[in-house]
Image (spheres, rainbow, N blue to C red):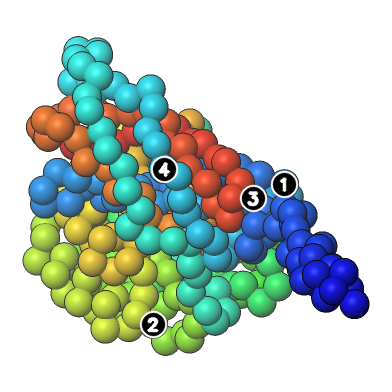
Amino acid sequence: MKKSVLLAPLTLALALVACTGPQAPQPPAGPTPAKASVNGYVVNADQSVNLNVSALDSQDTVLTSGTISDITVTDTALAQGQLGLQAAPAVTASKCGDITSVSGDFRAGILLDASGSMADNDPEKKRAEAAKLFIDRLSGTAAAAVTSFSGYDATSPYTELTVHQDFTTDKGALKAAVDEAAVAGGGTPLWEATQELVQFVSTKTGNRVGVVLTDGAANGTDNLAPAIAAAKAAGMRLFMIGLGSPDDLDTADMQQAAQQTGGTYALANDAAALNTAFGGVFNATQGAGCIKLVVQPAPTAGQILSGRVNFKVNGAALSAPFSVQY
C-alpha cells in the first residue's frame, strides 16, 4: 500500500510532463511576407526621418496588417549632392507604427503634371508607363480617376484641374486617359489643382487617396494650407511624387502635405525611377507601417542619406534599400 501511495505523485508528475513538455514551434501570427519595400519618407522638424514601409507576399500582394520588430539599419552613407560620399553616420531605428490599412473601397485620384518642363524631364513619357502600372494593380471594386494640371483647359467647375477620366474600374479607359494627360505645355498650379483634386475625390467614400506627380516648383503656395486642410477634413491621404532635382522642387511643402494627411513623399531623381515611385505609392495605399530613423549628427539641407533597413514582419526577416534627400 505504501508503495502505491508513493508512486501516485510520480505517475501524476510524469503525466504532467507529457502534457506540458516541449511544444512544436508556433507559426508567426498573420500572413508571412516574402519581401519589403520602402515606399517613401518624410523628414521631421527635428531632422529625424519616418520611412513608410510595406511587406508583400510571393505574389506581390501587399499585406494589410503585420507586426514590425527587430529593426536594424546597415550600409549607411551620407553624401552631399554631387560631391559623393561624405561620411558613414550613426543611425538608430525604431518602430513608429505597425503595418495597417484603411478600410473601404479604394478610390485613387491620379494627378499628373502637364507643365512645359515635363517635355525636358520626361521626354519619353515614363510617367504614363508608371501610372499604367499603378492602374494594372487595381483589383476588385478598386477604382481610379485620371486628372492633370497645366493652367489650361480645366474641367468645369474647376479652374486648374483637368479631368480626363472620372472614377471607373475600367483599366482600358483609365490607360487611355493617362495617354491623354501625359502632355507638356503650361505652368505649375500645383496646390490649386491639388485642392481641386481633394474636392473631386472627396465626393467618394472609402479609402480615398490623391497621387500627385510634379517636376517643378509651384506657381505659388497660397493654396498649400487650404489643400492640406481640405484633405484632412475629408480624411483623404495625399501621396506626393517629385520628379527631378530636389533643387527644382518644393520638397518641404510636398512633404508637409503628405505628412499632415497621412500620406508619404517619394523622390524620383529621373523619369526612369517613376515606376518604382508609383509602385511604392500603391503599396503605401494598401498597407504600410512606419520606421523612424535618427541620425547623429543631424544631416543638413542638400545631404542624401542612404542605406538598408532590415526588420521582421510577423516573424519573417525582410530588407529594403532607402534613400532620403534632406
Asked whether the beta carbons under mark 3 and mark 4 sit within 8 Å of each other, the answer is no
Q: Could you tell me which residue is drawn at 25 percent across and 14 percent down? A: 85
Of callouts 2 and 3, the N-terminal one: 3
| Residue type, numbered disc 3 | Pro
Identify the residue position indicated by label 2 in the image.
202
The quarter in which the C terminus is drawn is: top left
Q: Residues within 10 Å of mark 4 (few under 14, many from 20)?
A: some
Give the alpha-carbon distance from disc 4 to disc 1, as whole Å.
Answer: 22 Å
Identify the residue position indicated by label 4 in the image.
71
Of callouts 4 and 1, the N-terminal one: 1
Of callouts 3 and 1, the N-terminal one: 3
Front of the two marks 1 and 2: 1
Front of the two marks 3 and 4: 4
Q: Is residue 270 above or below residue 279?
A: above
| Residue type, numbered disc 1 | Ser
| Residue type, numbered disc 2 | Ser
Of callouts 3 and 4, the N-terminal one: 3
Secondary element at image label 2? loop
Write down the quadrant of residue 306 in the picture: top left
Give the alpha-carbon distance from disc 4 to disc 2, as whole Å.
Answer: 36 Å
Asked whether the beta carbons under mark 4 and mark 1 sit within 8 Å of each other, the answer is no
Secondary element at image label 1? loop
Q: Could you tell me which residue is drawn at 46 percent across and 50 percent down? A: 69
Identify the residue position indicated by label 3 in the image.
33
| Residue type, numbered disc 4 | Ile
Of 294 and 138, which appears nearest the observer?
294
Of 14 and 89, which appears nearest the observer?
14
Identify the residue position indicated by label 1 in the image.
58
Q: Residues within 10 Å of mark 1 (few under 14, many from 20)?
A: few
Q: Is residue 186 left or right of residue 163?
A: left
